């Protein structure tokens, strides 16, 4: 029941294993906001389980090598976002291991990690700084981050007052500028106008050309086939298929015809 994360933004050699997931399992409580109480943690009750618990993921194992582009496929509620949170280190497993040997840039739940009461300017500095960018680097990239998001007129506006679309623009712009070798993207390409999505597509292509690793959660088959060469198909918390993205999408469509 451990997770290991090493922050290392150095370029990762091709074919080097950077993520290893082994026997992964994570349990939640139904219809509850919290996973478990401190009493449960220290009594050992969480390991035994309780009535109403369910496994969001169970016995999931796979390895990832540098430069892979992986599409995570499955219906809503099948563990896709939970898997990304485990890789990002913001959630910890109840069983198994997640070993990540490279820095991770997560764009999960669109704007997770951004502080509503801080301005756009402060959020850019805070997020980039927490991911290891130096003050000089942030200053050099600040204008391009704001320009990419189209947020020149709202840099001193509290983040919570932005429209949902602008929040997505700012979040993607910041996260995609980070130097981490692994990028996690959860459904963000489904949000925003056509022009901004086109900019996101171009940026992701640049990221892949740089040899970085991509995890993409999306219900858009066109996006998955465009960017990903490998797929992970999750159903009821189990890894049903790990293989070429076309094979994975074909299997998913066979199991869940429109």
Image (cartoon, helix red, strand yellow):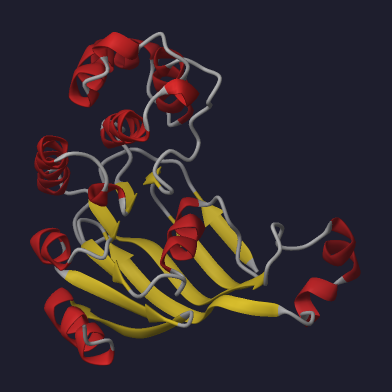
Q: Is residue 95 above or below residue 176?
A: below
Q: Is residue 237 visible?
A: yes
Would you identify the image quadrant in which residue 100 lies? bottom left
Q: Tell me the residue at 33%/36% (across/down).
A: 168
Residue 139 is left or right of residue 2, and the answer is: left
> Nearest the camera: 16 or 256?
256
> How many marks overall?
0
Q: Is residue 199 above or below residue 162?
A: below
Q: Name the spot of residue 187 as percent of width and height, x first.
A: 31, 54
The quarter of the picture where residue 42 lies is bottom right
Quadrant in the picture for residue 132: top left
Q: Residue at x 72, y 58 (%)?
A: 34
175 over 142 or under it: above or below: below
Residue 139 at least partly seen:
no
Out of 257 and 149, give the one closest to the viewer.
Answer: 257
Q: Residue at x 21, y 84 (%)?
A: 253
The x and y percentages for residue 77 are 47, 71
Give how far across and how far down residue 169 sits, in percent: 28, 32
Quadrant where the C terminus is found in the figure: bottom left
Residue at 43%, 48% in the rendered image = 109
**Image quadrant where one finds the N terminus:** bottom right
């Amino acid at each position: 029941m451990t997770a290991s994360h090493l922050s290392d933004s150095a370029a990762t050699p091709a074919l080097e294993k950077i993520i290893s997931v082994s026997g992964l399992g994570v349990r939640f409580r139904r219809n509850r906001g919290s996973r478990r109480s401190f009493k449960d943690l220290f009594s050992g009750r969480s390991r035994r389980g309780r009535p109403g618990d369910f496994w969001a993921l169970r016995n999931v194992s796979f390895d990832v090598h540098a430069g892979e582009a992986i599409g995570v496929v499955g219906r809503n509620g099948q563990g896709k976002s939970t898997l990304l949170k485990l890789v990002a280190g913001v959630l910890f497993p109840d069983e198994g291991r997640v070993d990540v040997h490279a820095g991770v840039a997560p764009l999960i739940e669109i704007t997770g990690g951004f502080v509503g009461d801080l301005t756009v300017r402060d959020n850019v500095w805070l997020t980039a700084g927490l991911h290891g960018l130096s003050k000089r680097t942030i200053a050099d990239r600040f204008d391009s981050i704001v320009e990419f998001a189209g947020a020149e007129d709202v840099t001193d506006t509290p983040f919570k007052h932005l429209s949902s679309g602008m929040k997505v623009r700012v979040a993607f712009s910041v996260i995609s500028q980070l130097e981490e070798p692994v990028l996690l993207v959860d459904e963000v390409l489904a949000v925003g106008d056509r022009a901004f999505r086109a900019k996101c597509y171009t940026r992701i292509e640049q990221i892949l050309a740089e040899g970085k690793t991509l995890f993409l959660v999306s219900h858009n088959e066109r996006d998955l086939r465009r960017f990903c060469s490998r797929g992970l198909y999750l159903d009821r918390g189990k890894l049903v298929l790990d293989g070429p993205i076309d094979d994975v999408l074909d299997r998913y469509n066979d199991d869940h015809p429109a």
